[in-house]
Image: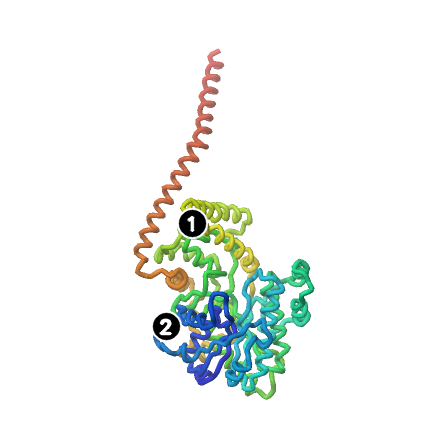
Amino acid sequence: MIAEFFENREIFLTGGSGVVGKALVEKLLRSCNVRKIYILLRTKRNATIEERMKQMKMDKIFRRLNSEKPNEFLQKVVPVPGDVTLPMLGITNEYLKLMENVSIIYHSAATVRFNETIKDAIRLNVGGTYEALKFGQMLKYLDTFIYISTFFSNPYLEYVEPKMYEAPMNWKFCLDLCQRNDIPDETMNIITNKLIVGFPNTYTFTKNLAESLVNDYRDKLPVALYRPSIVIQAFDDPEPGFPTSLSGAMALFTLTGAGILKTVHMANDIQIDMAPLDITTKSLLYYTVRTFNMYTHAVERPNEVPIYHVSSCNHTEIKLHQLIDIMTNFKIWQKVALEKSLLLPGMYYTESTLVYRLLVYTLHIFPALLVDTLLRISGQQPALMKIQRKIFVTMEVLKPFMFNNYRSDGITYAQEMLKELHCTDFDMDPIQRAANYYSNVGICLDLATKSRDVLFNEDPSTIPRAKILLKIKELLYRLLQLFVAYKIYYGVFDPIIKEWSTREYLEKIFNDTLSRK
């Protein structure tokens, strides 16, 4: 069904170098016989477009594709110079002519920084979407335009349905406001606090505005909204446990293994909503086919823009603290120990702000200061305190999602996909495994194993050596604990006990003397 639909199609993708973008390219090339995939790329300060394409091809997410179809990437992926902040995405007439047969657009490009300034967030997330839609109008064979949004585009709701909600502000007004150069940044910061009431950050706010923009184009283009929740590691495809990055929710598990992230501030009942990478990719392709059928084979256009969710609600009852406990209780990081690690793997979680701050000082800041001091003494640049500062800011930004459960109906058309895609290269069967507690042990082990390989670039052959180093570190840690306990006992408690004992002895002598008299 999906493979047949994408046969010989030409596809245009913005945000192709991002997590979802690369996974989508990989799946299209490996499981579908597409004709071309055009990827919008901008030149970076330290890399040309050609160099970025070479780097992208060598990304580990493509190693299975490069093994099974060695020439597929180079033959079918075409870089398109441009920038989402420019009119018509900065695409020249020459490339527009080259892309005239494009029939599918995936607009994924966005700033995902939660603390992005309101000006930059709107210019990229709203302005970029506007330019992508205008570009789509130039394509006479366009069948489907999919805007990749987020499940958290309406974070003020406890229960989110796959439908359009009224935007808090007009997207045109906000875009015009942020494109003006006569408003000082200080004024924009004040305006930001007024604009994003009900939204925890500029990211969710601008994604909401962009959805409103896409909805306004439903009578002009065959558009749809795709709302995945927090994208995490793959269950099976392209490799079991293939991770996304060292940031966001993935950091809760990966940086814990490195002994860098030791404590998290969160509610005990939190069930953080997640979207496995392969489920995200496969469902996106399925929804593309479904959107095409809705616009092409229906008697009339849909009254509302089609909206699809990939949310773990109703598919698993596993709480976040249970996943953390699995990593600890089943000694996942001891089984695949990291060579590059600081403290012992493991994490403490708490609802108490006071306890959390205390743990941050003792487990994050003090070790970082010690290591950076040693680096300075040895003539090297300090690094760990900078990392810990970034982690702390990230955890603070994620706090709204660590204390609020967002509910939904789960994955849109989940049962339909389970049935229609079963025993194909796009099967959705893995979502049924996530509900089982002990299946999550295997899922966590796959995550740790692949994170060691992909994110930390450590060869699997070094695991035995890393285990020995970890045991030595554990021994040294226990000895340090004993030493500290010894110092505390004899420095604090022993003098008190002796004082008490002396006082009791003197009181006894005094009382005996009195009794004799």
For the N terminus, which image quadrant? Answer: bottom left
Task: Select label 2 or label 1 by which is in front.
Answer: 1
Q: Which color scheme does this rendered protein use?
A: rainbow
Q: Is residue 247 visible?
A: yes
Establish if 503 lies above or below 142. Answer: above
- What x and y, as percent, mark residue 228? 52, 70
| Horizontal relation, residue 442 to residue 189: left or right | left
Badge 2: how crowded within 10 Å, few (<14), some, or many (20+)?
Answer: some
Q: Is residue 234 above or below residue 421?
A: above
User: The residue under label 1 is which amino acid type?
Assistant: Gln
Q: Does 45 sit left or right of 199 as displayed?
A: left
Q: Position of residue 149 (x, y in %)?
A: 56, 71
State how far apart marks 2 and 1 are (Cα): 38 Å
**Which residue position is annotated with label 2?**
64
Residue in view at x 43 percent, y 80 percent:
76
Q: Residue at x 48, y 20 (%)?
A: 507
Closest to the observer, 220 or 128: 128
| Residue 63: x %, y % from top left | 37, 71
Q: Label 1, on which residue?
A: 380
Q: In the picture, residue 423 is in which quadrant? A: bottom left
Q: Is residue 233 above or below residue 72?
A: above
Q: Is residue 351 above or below residue 158?
A: above
Helix, strand or loop for disc 1: loop
Depth check: give the residue in front, 162 or 142: 142
Q: Are marks 2 and 1 in contact (CB under 8 Å)?
A: no
Q: Residue at x 62, y 70 (%)?
A: 209
Q: Residue farthest to the top?
A: 517
Number of residues whose C-alpha sits closer than 10 Å to that of mark 1, classed few (under 14), some (14–19) or many (20 or more): few
Viewer-nearest residue: 458 or 397: 458
Q: Which sits in the foreground, 287 or 131?
A: 131
- The amino acid pointed to by label 2 is Arg
Which mark, by number, is residue 273? none
